[in-house]
Amino acid sequence: MPRGFDDVVATAMAKEPADRYSTCRALATAAREALATGPGGPGRPADPDEGLPTTLTAAGAVAGLAGAGPAGPDTGERPATPRRTAAILAVVGTVLAAGVVTAFVVRGGGTAGTATIGATSQGQESPPARDSATSSIPSSSTLSSPAPTSAATPVPGLPHSDPIGDQVLLANRTANGAEGLFQVDTASGQVGQPLLSGAPGPQYPVLSQDRGSVIYFQAGANTLRPAAVDGTGDRFLFDTPPANCQNYHRPAWNPVDQSELALLCTTSGGSLTLNLVGVDGRVRDPVATGLATVDDVAFSPDGKSLAYWGSDSQGAGGGRIYVQSVDGGEPTPITDPGAGNDADPVFSPDGSNIVFRRVGTDAAGGPIAHLYVVNADGSGEPTPLTDGSSVDQDPIYSPDGTEVAFKSSRQNSAGTNDDQIWVVPVDGSATPRELGVGAPGVADGAPAWGHR
């Protein structure tokens, strides 16, 4: 064993800590340098005939110290006593450990050099590792605003803009002879700027479930058109219209499958057909009503049923309210207007009720139209929602189901009986209030608020 190695061992085992090597790396470096020299010291070349290897690996050093090789010539070196051998083994073990620690630090992404396990570079104890799955703090929005169970999304391929709030409806108005579609705030009654103007007739809009798109029937031009609720992207809905659809009617929009409409068409022969149609114009399924006339189609909130008015008389302007499954089967009548007629049915957002208008006559024989609410299954008698002092029609529920907007000829704030949009609570707790007070023009078409 080279004499210099004894010095390394002595330093490593010094009594006073200050006299020892300051780091494991320093000890390992000194041991390697000592073992790499010849037995006589730094200036003496190694003798290749000695029994111990002069070029050491850790394994070779241990094997050599075990005395497995042949005995070499006597060089005057001290024999390895058990105590000395133990010290040498300890130093060699330290060299091995230092190499392992160094490799761990380098491969682990640390900086090669003096490493203090369990300490940061500032010498402080490292904090325990945190599990990202449990240590991340939820945002306040996650805590205070849980996501809805069924969040509607934009309809692919249709014009779309930021959705309008639940308190905003769309309504057609006529001012100075010009038709236009407007946003109306039901809370303040304020009428916004026209989204679409210069139309050849009234518009009958239907809102998407996410309230960012609209499809409307354009009377006077016999077209269906989509647009974003801010008025952008207005265009024809169908590149190729459904076969034998000569005249459109206002569609209903499936609130569950927003790619689907329930569309009434007048054929070239003058008959009416009701079909489930994609927004791309492809007919998916016919709905056989068995009635000569149907109109004012509306989807149930689960998308499984349709409500409409129907009559056995061709060309009738109203009839009974029916509910029919979109999967087929016979339509179920849920009202009996007697001498009058019912029309304009719309489901409540929870699907339990249907609001509709019933036409009758007043004491002088003039027409009047009440709004009524009936159970969607037809049980019980319809309950009047308005007083029947005028013509109330085209009702639509608010998205939360607490109010109904409708068009009415009741006396307005201007002292006339021109049509305006009104809102009434469904529980009858207040009288109807007028929207758009002071705005020019009159209401035309039908309002869109909740789903239809």
Image: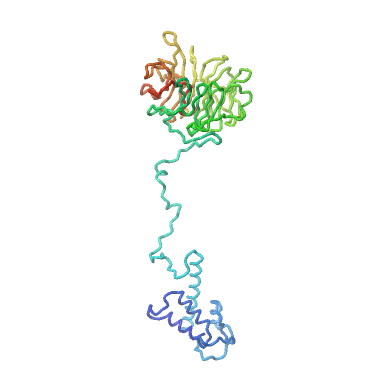
* Most distant residue in the top direction: 364
Please tell me in which quadrant of the rendered image residue 279 appears: top right
| Residue 137 horizontal/vertical position (percent) | 41, 50
How far across and how far down the image is residue 384, in percent?
42, 19
| Residue farthest left in this picture | 430
Number of callouts: 0
> In this picture, is 148 found above or below 293?
below
Tell which of 328 and 370 is nearer to you: 370
What residue is shown at x 55% (from left), y 19% (from top)?
294
Task: Say which residue appears at 38% left-offset and 18% top-offset.
Answer: 412
Colouring chosen for the image of the structure: rainbow
Looking at this view, name the residue that lies furthest to the front.
176
Q: Quadrant of residue 240?
A: top right
Vertical order, 369 against 56 (above or below)? above
Q: Position of residue 249 (x, y in %)?
A: 55, 22
Residue 339 % position (x, y): 49, 11
- Residue at the spot x=39%, y=65% of the render? 122
Q: Viewed as shown, does residue 326 lie left or right of 132?
A: right
